[in-house]
C-alpha cells in the first residue's frame, strides 16, 4: 500500500502568506495531478496556538530567524504563522482536498515545535500517524509539500525511521532557504538516510 503525505500546503506558506515559501504555489497543480494514484492520502496542518513559542513576537527582545534554546532544543524564531482557525492555517484553496483521507495537525503545544508529521522536535510525543499508516497496511510513503528544509525533511526522516520505504517527490516540494543551500543540504541529508528522491512523473 502506498500513501501520499501532503505537508503543510497552507495559505501562510504560499505567496502573500506570513511565512511565504518561494514558489510554494507551484507545487499545487503537481500534487493535484498525482493524488488519485495513491491508496491513501494524508495531509498535515501546522496548527499553532497564538502563544506558540516558535513565534519571535512571543519573546521580548528576540528577532526573526534568531535561534534560541526552547526547553533544551534549538528553536528558530519564526513570524506568527498558521494560527489555529485563522485564514493563514487553511489549506490553499487550489489544493484538491477530495482525495484526502486524514488530516494530522501538529505544533499545538506552545512549548515545543513539531516539524515532522510523526513526532514533535524532541520526539517526546507521537501524533499517531505511524500507527495509522501501519494499521492501513501502508509500506511506502511519498512526501510532498512545504517546506523542503523543515517540515518535509523531518517528516521524511521520521517516515524512514518508522520503517516505511520513503520517497521524496522533489518537484512537489519547495523550501524556505533561509541560507542559500538549505534545500540542497536537506535533500542530501534525506538521500544519505536512504530516502529515494524522485519526480512526480515517476509515481
Ligand atoms: C514549517 C517553519 C515553521 C514548515 C512550519 O511547514 O516547514 N516551517 N513551521
Ligand atoms: Zn510552524
Image: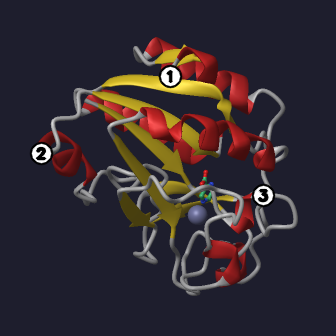
Q: Nearer the viewer, residue 1 or 181?
A: 1
Task: Kindly identify which residue carries mark 1.
Answer: 190
Q: Position of residue 125 (x, y in %)?
A: 25, 60
Q: Nearer the viewer, residue 64 or 50?
A: 50
Of tags 2 and 1, the one toward the viewer is: 2
Q: Secondary structure at mark 2?
A: helix
Left or right of 95 on screen, residue 98: left
Q: Nearer the viewer, residue 180 or 22?
A: 22
Quarter of the displayed picture in which ligand 1 can be seen: bottom right
Q: Image quadrant for the N terminus? A: top left
Q: Secondary structure at mark 3?
A: loop
What mark, if any, has residue 14 been given in the picture? 3
Seen in the picture, residue 173 relative to 163 is either above or below; the reply is below
Seen in the picture, residue 154 relative to 187 is either above or below; the reply is below
For marks 1 and 3, the one nearer the N-term is: 3
Task: Kindly identify which residue carries mark 2.
Answer: 135
Q: Position of residue 48 (x, y in %)?
A: 53, 76
Q: Residue at x 24, y 56 (%)?
A: 126
CB within 8 Å, label 3 to label 2: no
Q: Secondary structure at mark 1?
A: helix
For marks 3 and 2, the one nearer the N-term is: 3
In three-dimensional space, the C-alpha distance between marks 3 and 2, rounded to whole angstroms, equals 33 Å
Amino acid at each position: 500500500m502506498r500513501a501520499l503525505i501532503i505537508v503543510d500546503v497552507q495559505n501562510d506558506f504560499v505567496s502573500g502568506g506570513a511565512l511565504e515559501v518561494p514558489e510554494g504555489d507551484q507545487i499545487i497543480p503537481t500534487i493535484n495531478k498525482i493524488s488519485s494514484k495513491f491508496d491513501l492520502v494524508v495531509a498535515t496542518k501546522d496548527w499553532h496556538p497564538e502563544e506558540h513559542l516558535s513565534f519571535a513576537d512571543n519573546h521580548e527582545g528576540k528577532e526573526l530567524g534568531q535561534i534560541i534554546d526552547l526547553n533544551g532544543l534549538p528553536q528558530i524564531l519564526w513570524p506568527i504563522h498558521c494560527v489555529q482557525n485563522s485564514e493563514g492555517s487553511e489549506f490553499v484553496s487550489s489544493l484538491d482536498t477530495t482525495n484526502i483521507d486524514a488530516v494530522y495537525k501538529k505544533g499545538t503545544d506552545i512549548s515545543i515545535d513539531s516539524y515532522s508529521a510523526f513526532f514533535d522536535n524532541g520526539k517526546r510525543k507521537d501524533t499517531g500517524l505511524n500507527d495509522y499508516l501501519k494499521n492501513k497496511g501502508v509500506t511506502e510513503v511519498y512526501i510532498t509539500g512545504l517546506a523542503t528544509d523543515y517540515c518535509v525533511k523531518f517528516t521524511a526522516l521520521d517516515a524512514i525511521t518508522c520503517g516505511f520505504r520513503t520517497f521524496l517527490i522533489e518537484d512537489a516540494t519547495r523550501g524556505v532557504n533561509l541560507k542559500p543551500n538549505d534545500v540542497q543540504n536537506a535533500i542530501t541529508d534525506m538521500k544519505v538516510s536512504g530516502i529515494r528522491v524522485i519526480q512526480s512523473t515517476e509515481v
